[in-house]
Amino acid sequence: MSGEGLLVAALKIAAAVAIGLPLVLYLAQDSLIFYRQPLAEARSAQIARAYPSAQAFALAAADGSRLLRPLRPAVRQSASSIADAVGSPAPDDRARERAV
């Protein structure tokens, strides 16, 4: 094999790796990022005891698999309690400041 033939073969291999590896990673990204971890019954019971207000939530995917997770109801907060949490005045406090 001549020097040119060896160089062409090396470039073909490099091009195959440069195209193939990102393609494989792109196609496998869901399984690489979102590792399927089934929830054991013991863990499910532990969550139910820790969060009695949680409700079962099921989401069906197009491929037939189901995602089952506990869902806690949202806690409603007033604007003043949220403003206290972030340290800024609530809208009704601003109105009082203008009146003074």
Image (tube, grey):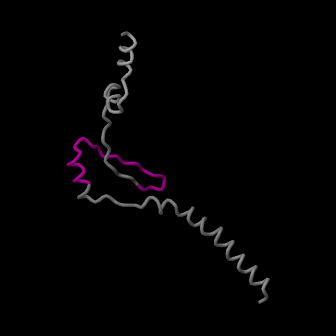
Residue 5: % across, % down:
78, 84
Q: Nearer the viewer, residue 88 or 28?
A: 88
- Identify which residue is drawn at 31% across, 58% down: 39
Q: Which residues are magenta?
A: 44-65
The residue at the far front in this view is 100
- Identify which residue is drawn at 42% across, 61% down: 35
Q: Quadrant of residue 11?
A: bottom right
Q: Quadrant of residue 22?
A: bottom right
Quarter of the image that includes the C terminus: top left
Residue 80: % across, % down:
33, 25
The residue at the far left in this view is 49
Residue 73: % across, % down:
31, 38
> Please, is residue 57 above or below residue 7 in the view?
above
- Identify which residue is drawn at 22% across, 53% down: 46
- Identify which residue is drawn at 33% across, 50% down: 69
Residue 97: % across, % down:
37, 15
Q: Is residue 3 magenta?
A: no
Quarter of the image that includes the N terminus: bottom right
> Please, is residue 51 above or below residue 97 in the view?
below
Q: Nearer the viewer, residue 7 or 42?
A: 7
Q: Nearer the viewer, residue 28 or 100?
A: 100
| Total numbered labels | 0
> Please, is residue 15 above or below residue 80 in the view?
below
The residue at the far bottom in this view is 1
From the viewer's perspective, is 9 left or right of 34? right
